[in-house]
Image (cartoon, grey):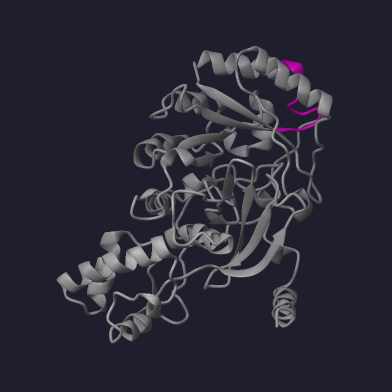
Amino acid sequence: MTPLMSSPGNIDPVPVARPTAPRPDGKIDLVGLSKAEMREALTTGGLDAKGAKLRAKQIWHWIYNRGATDFSLMTDIARAQQPWLSNRFVIGRPEIVEAQVSTDGTRKWLLRTPDAQDFEMVFIPDADRGTLCVSSQIGCTLNCRFCHTGTMRLVRNLTAGEIVGQVMLARDALGEWPSTQDGRLLTNIVMMGMGEPLYNFEAVRDALKIVMDGDGLALGKRRITLSTSGVVPMMARAGEEIGVNLAVSLHAVTKEVRDEIVPLNRKYGIEELLQACADYPGANNARRITFEYVMLRDKNDSDADAHELVRLLRKYKLPAKVNLIPFNPWPGAAYDTSPPDRIKSFSNIVFEAGISAPVRTPRGRDIDAACGQLKTASDRKTRAELDRLAEEKQVALG
């Protein structure tokens, strides 16, 4: 066992709301507003209540079913009123700073907000599904030792519109408008990108309500997974108010090791976390809780660790699936990936106990899009360099 290391940063990050600067153009972005909020925005802009209700219903359909970003395309809205809408409102998308495609088909986007903050999202295509990995914060406060995002400071929370906007942008890129239930490439969403979703609860909840709305993006709650590092006080509320699948970043089975690699464990320990999982609304054998477990050489990958994991899951009678994740290296990381035979042995022990323990195939490693590798490229390239690359790409496209 390698020696324990001190962990940088706070172990009890305060999830305070960081202010979001208004859009430079002063317009209100309609993406991410609830139906009631959209009606209110139109009323505040000058429409009467009846007109606002009608227009909100029409605009909602164009935004979430047709993918429209321009009021002039909304053919059932009077042409004379379209400029009035354009002068006051916008149907936003995050700005694409850089788009990369891995050799395995994984896509990663570096995105920029209107207040010039950068974050990333990833799309992972498989034969039977396509999963979008969505970010909830710009940066992160949790300082998980194996995670590249954890080396960033928290800049601010993403808004509901910026969270929904990631899904909209992926639909744009995949050519999935108008929205249909059949033949979708984007079938699943995981809140596993940058940040801790439960430290941005309201925005994540409001965004996912739009994603799940039958009149909205219409993805069922069973196709959405929210991942947390273990913010215990918010877990029950997430089950009640959002109701999607739960994934928990466990990564260790002893206090000593989890305190090191997931510092939040010093506030909400393993036993408290697993009890919150047992109490999670809707958890059953049909809707198992997924436990994410990154495999770190000589740190958390022994047969004894595997047996202890089984003991803990049985103790709390948890309907569980364990995703074993080979560590994805990044520059300066303090850990190594567990050898394949060690991962296989660990997996076999858990499987033989009747608990599913698949080994996740790393995806997008060559573009730093794999689990734990997300860190905005703006940390590695200057804004000037990124702007130059964007200009060169535009010139190349003609």
Q: What's the residue at 77%, 29% (across, down)? A: 299
Q: Which residues are magenta?
A: 294-304
Nearest to the observer: residue 69 or residue 359? 69
Q: Is residue 366 left or right of residue 90?
A: right
Q: Is residue 27 visible?
A: no
Nearest to the observer: residue 257 or residue 247? 247
**Residue 216 within the magenta-colored segment of the rendering:** no
**Residue 295 within the magenta-colored segment of the rendering:** yes
Q: Quadrant of residue 243?
A: top left
Q: What's the residue at 64%, 61% (across, down)? A: 109
Q: Is residue 85 above or below residue 209?
A: below
Where in the figure is residue 291, as x and y percent of width and height? 58, 30
Where in the figure is residue 234, as x and y percent of width and height? 42, 39
The outermost residue toward the front is 182
Where in the figure is residue 1, as x and y percent of width and height? 81, 25
Q: Is residue 248 visible?
A: yes
Q: Quadrant of residue 210?
A: bottom left
Q: Is residue 116 left or right of residue 335?
A: left
Q: What's the residue at 77%, 26% (across, down)? A: 343
Q: What's the residue at 35%, 37% (across, down)? A: 240
Q: Is residue 126 left or right of residue 85?
A: right
